[in-house]
Image (cartoon, helix red, strand yellow):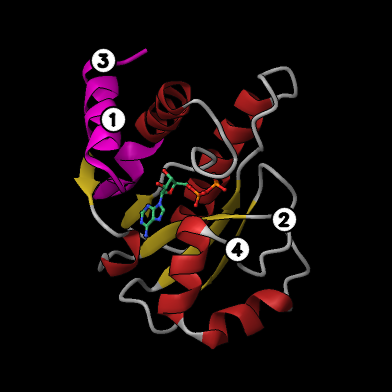
Amino acid sequence: MIRVLRADITTLPVDAIVNAANTTLLGGGGVDGAIHRAAGPELKAYCAELGGCPTGEARITPGFRLPAKWVIHAVGPVWHGGGREEATLLASCYRNALELAAAHGARTIAFPSISTGAYGYPKDEAARIAVSVMRVYEGRFDEIIACCFSEADKRLYEDTLEIGPP
Ligand code: ADP
């Protein structure tokens, strides 16, 4: 089941939360900064050992001080206008995050709206991609949460889900 929630993702008691990370995995602004602050310095130390992550891929770490058991660090594409495989890369980062979560036995997972902050991905197109990948995986989880930071994002995801299966 896919659920839309307006929340700070760092507060969610789910098996895994997904971070909109950058390729260094060493933290940044937005949701990445919030996750690192809430997880504590152990997260950055652990991430430093991973040696980064290419765009479109994901890596898993413990949640440390977070209520979530794991953090899955997924690297979304920077929006350059749509001609640089952005849609493929964004879909693959949702897919890789869900595959990693399933491989670790996670039953509940929450995603922020990857790439739609500092990385500038158009929100409606990003939500369409997120929802279409979530639909493929929803049977393998108890709950996949689209965790929205604003009321406008929440409405966008609700509208996107209502369009029905592709
Ligand atoms: P990116 O660099 O991938 O664009 P950002 O962190 O800048 O990542 O933004 C991604 C999304 O995360 C945006 O929609 C932003 O509003 C949202 N966001 C920021 N902080 C939080 C948070 N604490 N919980 C959930 N979502 C958040």
> Could you tell me how far apart the alpha carbons at marks 1 and 3 are, in whole angstroms?
12 Å
> What amino acid does circle 2 point to?
Thr
Q: Which mark is residue 157?
A: 1
Question: Which percent across, then down, holds residue 6?
Answer: 22, 48
Q: Secondary structure at mark 4?
A: loop
Image quadrant where one finds the C terminus: top left
Within-10-Å neighbours for mark 1: few <14, some 14–19, many 20+: many
Q: Which residue is mark 4?
A: 28
Distance in Å between CA atoms under marks 1 and 4: 25 Å
Q: Is residue 1 visible?
A: no
Magenta range: 137-166
Q: Position of residue 66 (x, y in %)?
A: 36, 77
The residues tagged by marks 4 and 3 sit, at their Cα atoms, a distance apart of: 35 Å
- Asked where in the image residue 38 lies, by quadrant, the reply is bottom left
Residue type at numbered disc 3 = Gly
Q: Position of residue 118 (x, y in %)?
A: 56, 45
* Contact (Cβ within 8 Å) of mark 4 with mark 3: no
Occupied quadrant, residue 132: top left
In three-dimensional space, the C-alpha distance between marks 2 and 4, rounded to whole angstroms, equals 10 Å
For this view, does 26 lie left or right of residue 131? right
4 over 47 or under it: above or below: above
List the residue tagged with mark 3.
164
In this view, the mark in front (3 or 2)? 2
Q: Are marks 1 and 4 in contact (CB under 8 Å)?
A: no
The residue at which mark 2 appears reads as 23
Residue type at mark 1 is Tyr
Q: CA distance from mark 2 to mark 1?
A: 26 Å
Q: Is residue 3 magenta?
A: no
The residue drawn where x is 56% and y is 34% is 120
